[in-house]
Image: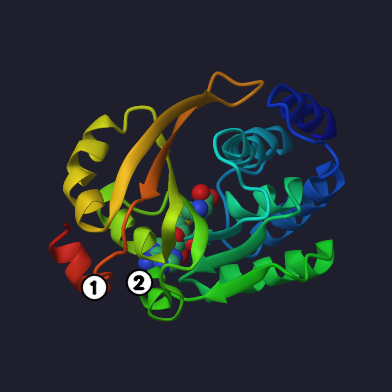
Amino acid sequence: MEQLLRDGLSALGLPTEGIPALVRYADLLVEKNKVMNLTAITEPADIAALHFLDSAALLTLADFRDKTVADVGTGAGFPGLPLRIIEPSIRLTLLDAQNKRIEFLKEVCDDLGLADAECVHARAEEFAADRRESFDLVTSRAVAALPLLCELCLPLVKVGGYFVAMKSVDAGAELDAAAHAIEVLGGAVERIADYDIPGTEVRHRAILIKKVRETGKKYPRPFAKIKKAPL
Ligand code: SAM
């Protein structure tokens, strides 16, 4: 795993100092996954590529240095935790609706000495009541379809900041379907970036949505409403 990470991070032009922490994180993930459903990806080479390098690629697409970053629906920590390990100046908040996953992430952060990383058990649409418009960047991977996801994430982003949605390269129709939601919630698509995960044939897409004005106070709505009537 170490060599794959070294090669992959170097190919992305990223620092490699975080490799020991990533290797330890992978060990903790595989161990905990034996007793809790955290990930279907368990081979070290796949964890390196499909979790760590996929997450790390975001650092090449936006400036994360010294930024407040919330990772919505982080699950076992992706993409947020690898981002923080590789770019230590990030002030990270990991958010998930499942407390077991948040408890796991607290253990990992303790183990890795990441005392400043905030691990929050909450639903994104409820968390917005306290922390709306307060993050420079919000990330999310594999959580929900984009129209719905935008209502969970864009209210948390400061005006001038970005929501970075990690999607597959065939997300064109999803993006079209989200156009209205993005507009209503105060966003504007600034960039669609397809990237290759180094050492694999896998190509993914990051959609960078800039927050161009404040989100109306009526958003986000309760989840039942978001789901029943997506914007
Ligand atoms: N982002 C991780 C990844 O890519 O490996 C985890 C993806 S997992 C399929 C989706 C996660 O989103 C779950 O852990 C779930 O609890 C969380 N989630 C779903 N809806 C959420 C919401 N409204 N607020 C916070 N977390 C949510």
Dividing the picture into quadrants, the one containing residue 53 is top right
Q: Position of residue 7 (x, y in %)?
A: 78, 24
Amino acid type indicated by mark 1: Arg
Q: Position of residue 166 (x, y in %)?
A: 45, 41
Position of 91 relative to 50 (above/below): below
In depth, the one of 210 and 73 nearer the eye is 210
Instruction: For ligand 1, tell me if the residue under mark 1 lies within 8 Å.
Output: no
Dividing the picture into quadrants, the one containing residue 31 is bottom right
Q: Position of residue 138 (x, y in %)?
A: 48, 56
Position of 51 relative to 217 (above/below): above
Residue 145 visible in the displayed image: no
Instruction: For ligand 1, tell me if the residue under mark 2 lies within 8 Å.
Output: yes
The residue located at (55%, 34%) in the rendering is: 61
Q: Which residue is mark 2?
A: 125
Label 2 with label 1: CB-CB less than 8 Å = yes
Residue 23 visible in the displayed image: yes
Query: Quick one: quadrant of the N terminus?
Result: top right
Q: Secondary structure at mark 1?
A: loop
The residue located at (20%, 43%) in the rendering is: 179
User: Which one is earlier in the sequence, the residue at label 2 or at label 1?
Assistant: 2
Q: Which disc is residue 221 wearing? A: 1
Q: Is residue 191 left or right of residue 195?
A: left
The residue located at (21%, 50%) in the rendering is: 183
**Crowd rating for badge 1 (residues with CA inside 10 Å; few <14, some 14–19, many 20+):** some
Q: Position of residue 17 (x, y in %)?
A: 86, 42
In depth, the one of 146 and 103 nearer the eye is 146
In depth, the one of 197 and 17 nearer the eye is 17
Q: Is residue 151 left or right of residue 123?
A: left
Dividing the picture into quadrants, the one containing residue 228 is bottom left
Give the Cα distance between marks 2 and 1.
7 Å
Q: Secondary structure at mark 2?
A: helix
Amino acid type indicated by mark 2: Glu
